[in-house]
Structure formats: structure tokens, C-alpha cells
Amino acid sequence: MQPRFVGRLGLADAVTVGNAMLGFVAAFVATRDAGLAARILLLAAVADGLDGVVARKRGGTLAGPYLDSLADVASFGVAPALLIASRAADAWTFADDPVAYVLGLLLPAVYVAMAVTRLGLYTAYDSDASETKGVPSTLAATILAAGVLAGFVGPTLLVALSGVLAALMVTQVTYPDLHPQDAVVMGAVQVLAIALRGRPGEAFAFALLFLSLAYLTLGPRFYWT
């Protein structure tokens, strides 16, 4: 007896499911190696962009939008939250700094909640549009992962960023989809940040962080043109 998904799902859906698997691996690794977890998160972001390309070229399925949001919960909701919480747990203990310890657990939990909320709203209202309201969860996770790889985002800033990005994911601010040529550039920078080590890797991680923050702050106002 063949699995139910045979004949119902396409190549784009397979890429999406691969994205979810990467999210699980990133979540598992986050408690052991923050740098490797950040690289896997960026690889998941590349897969997230690739499934859209494949869907446009090969066609999508009715299940595609739902699978995409479910995969994004794992890769860009739970996995980055675990990365943040694990860095916070390494930096603070409840006995030494209970306020920081609690915030280091609470804000990542809020981040997951807002990512799930945003992705549900996106699937219901924005999946067929060329724009979306609220900061995309992929962008939020990319900022966090690039900050870790760039080497200057410590636990305190990471926890604070998670709170800010959690709030921004459910705002009414409208973000346009990236133009194809810009998505290719972003993807290339992501791949180089993943593949390179040492100073070159940090440089591309910084470049990715700069581009992501530029889109975060300027995209809603200036990217339309």
C-alpha cells in the first residue's frame, strides 16, 4: 500500500518538508553548537525560498501553503527560539540572575507564539498575495542566525531581539515580496555565510545581517519602487 501523499504532493512540497527536517535538526543542535544551529537555520531559509521557485516552475499543490506554514513553524519559530533560550541558559542561572533567566525563557516562548500566529494569518489571508503584513518569520530567523554567525550578537541582545521581532511579526506593517533578483542575491549571501568559516564567513554573515535589517526597516517604505 503506497503512502497517501503519492500523487498528491509535488517536488516543491518535498523541498518544504526538507525545510521542516532542517528545522528539527537546527533545534536539536541549538543546545550544543550555536554556530552550527545558525548555519542550519540559514540553510532552511534557502530551502524556504527554493520551494517557491520550484512551485512556480513545476506547479504547486493544494497542500503546499499549509505545508509551508507548518514547516516554517519548526524552522523559523521553534528552532530559533531554542537557539535563543539555550544561549540565555548558558549565560545566566536562576540562582544568580532570576530576572534574566526568566526573560531568556519567556521571550523565546513569546517568539514561538507570535510566529505561529503570524504564519496562521499568512496562510489564511496573504499566501496568494504579493505582500504580507508583519515581519516574515523567515526574515526574523535570518536576522537572529546571521547575528550569531557575525559574532557580535550576545545572549542579552539575542533575547532582546527575539522580543522585538516577536512584536513585529504581528504588526499591521505591510512587507512586499522580494523581487526575484534580490532573492537570488540574498540566497547567495546566505550560502556563503553558511559555507565559509573564520573571517570570510563572519563577513558574509554581517553582510546578510545588514541586508536583512535594511529590508526590515526600509522595505515597507521604500521597496515598493
Image (tube, helix red, strand yellow):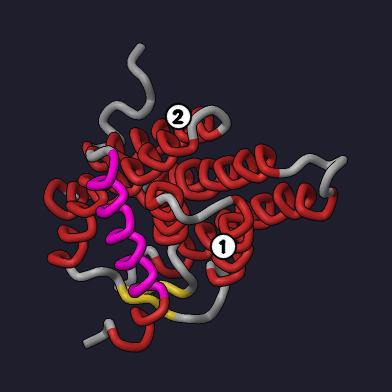
Q: Is disc 1 in contact with disc 2, using a CB cutoff of under 8 Å?
A: no
The answer to whether 82 is drawn above or below residue 56 in the figure is: above
The answer to whether 195 is drawn above or below residue 168 in the figure is: above
Q: Pick whichever, 163 or 147, lies toward us.
A: 147
The residue tagged with tag 2: helix, strand or loop? helix
Instruction: Tell me the tag on residue 161.
Output: 1
Q: Position of residue 223 (x, y in %)?
A: 27, 82
Main secondary structure type of the part rendered in magenta: helix
Q: Alpha carbon of mark 1 to alpha carbon of mark 2: how far?
A: 23 Å
The answer to whether 17 is drawn above or below residue 205 in the figure is: above
Q: Label 2 crowding class (10 Å Cα cut-off): few <14, some 14-19, many 20+? A: some
Q: Pick whichever, 138 or 200, lies toward us.
A: 200
Q: Pick whichever, 72 or 89, lies toward us.
A: 89
Q: Amino acid at mark 2?
A: Val
| Residue 177 found in image quarter | bottom left
Q: Amino acid at mark 1?
A: Leu
**Residue, x 21% and y 61% (percent of image)?**
183
**Residue, x 23% and y 59% (percent of image)?**
186
| Residue at the outermost front position | 199
Q: Is residue 136 magenta?
A: no
The residue tagged with tag 1: helix, strand or loop? helix
**Residue, x 59% and y 47% (percent of image)?**
84
Q: Which residue is mark 2?
A: 25
Residue 12 shows in the view? yes
**Residue, x 72% and y 47% (percent of image)?**
105
Q: Is residue 201 magenta?
A: yes
Residue span colored magenta: 198-216
